[in-house]
């Protein structure tokens, strides 16, 4: 089953509308969606290494735009949509402490969490809820999301064939590691916030 899903994903990654789908996933992940765009970046760059920089750019731009939407949810709609998203991910009990941490460590929080698998939507909503400086938030988002996606794209572009061979030979192991990585991000937020 994993092999069929992998083959299907690789085929979709090479399709003409793959960048649009990546854009939608990147945007949504920064404000409410649980699946990180890396799940699409990996097969897209492996399928089309010549488009690595375009893929990283689309992921960065749409992720930052989604982050702005998440900021707006936190700033304007925290009591309704913001709380709903926070509760959906099980962070309500620790969210208030996280929001107060922005008074002293806001920029550092954005920089660290923007590079990690910790759900970025929590950072974006918290930034808006704490009324963190919008332009610093945008600049930090561009920097962290850009670095993250460019590094992933570069590694896949330059070391893609061995990585692809490794993934195809050890698909179950790679899938398990990826799931542990994503779930670990959610667990880290739950217990570190």
Image (cartoon, grey):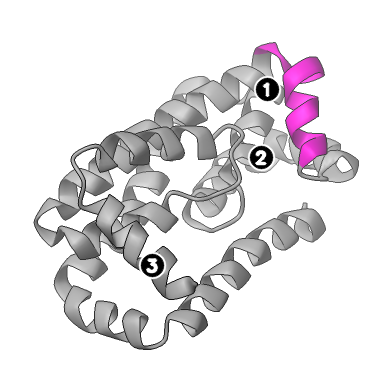
Q: How many labels does the image show?
A: 3
Q: In this view, does 158 lie above or below 71?
A: below
Residue on which disc 2 sits: 122
- Graded by Cα atoms within 10 Å as few (under 14), some (14 to 19) or many (20 or more), the crowding at tag 2 reads many
Q: Residue 76 versus residue 3: which sits nearer the camera? A: 3
Residue 45: which quarter of the image? bottom left
Question: Residue 185 lies in magenta, yes or no?
Answer: no
Residue at x 50%, y 48% (from the top left corner): 114
Residue situated in front as seen by the camera: 86 or 74? 86
**Residue, disc 1:** 74
Q: Where is residue 180 in the image (x, y as percent from the top left)?
A: 62, 72
Label whose residue precedes the other's in the sequence (2 or 1): 1
Q: Name the residue furthest top.
A: 76
Task: Pick whichever of labels 1 and 3 is earlier in the sequence.
Answer: 3
Q: How far apart are marks 1 and 3 (CA)?
A: 36 Å
Label 2 vs 3, first from the N-terminus:
3
Specify whether residue 82 is painted magenta: yes
Q: Mark 3 points at which residue?
A: 6
Identify the element where label 2 is drawn: helix
Question: How far apart are the two marked residues, 2 and 1, measured between alpha carbons?
Answer: 9 Å
For the point 25% across and 59% down, the residue is: 153
Q: Which of these two is toward me, 145 or 176?
A: 176
Q: Distance between the residues labelled 2 and 3?
A: 29 Å
Dominant SS in magenta: helix
Could you say whether the residue bearing mark 1 is in a helix, strand or loop?
helix
């Amino acid at each position: 089953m994993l092999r069929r899903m992998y083959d299907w994903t690789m085929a979709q990654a090479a399709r003409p509308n793959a960048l649009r789908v990546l854009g939608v996933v990147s945007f949504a992940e920064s404000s409410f969606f649980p699946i990180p765009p890396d799940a699409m970046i990996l097969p897209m760059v492996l399928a089309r290494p010549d488009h690595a920089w375009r893929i990283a750019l689309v992921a960065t731009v749409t992720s930052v735009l989604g982050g702005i939407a998440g900021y707006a949810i936190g700033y304007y709609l925290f009591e309704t949509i913001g709380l709903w998203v926070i509760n959906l991910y099980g962070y309500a009990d620790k969210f208030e402490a996280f929001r107060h941490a922005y008074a002293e460590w806001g920029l550092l929080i954005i920089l660290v969490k923007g590079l990690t698998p910790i759900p970025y939507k929590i950072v974006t909503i918290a930034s808006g809820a704490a009324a963190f400086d919008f332009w610093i938030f945008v600049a930090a988002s561009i920097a962290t999301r850009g670095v993250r996606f460019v590094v992933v794209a570069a590694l896949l572009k330059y070391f893609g064939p061995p990585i692809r061979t490794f993934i195809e030979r050890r698909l179950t192991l790679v899938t398990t590691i990826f799931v542990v990585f994503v779930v670990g991000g959610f667990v880290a937020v739950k217990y570190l916030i």
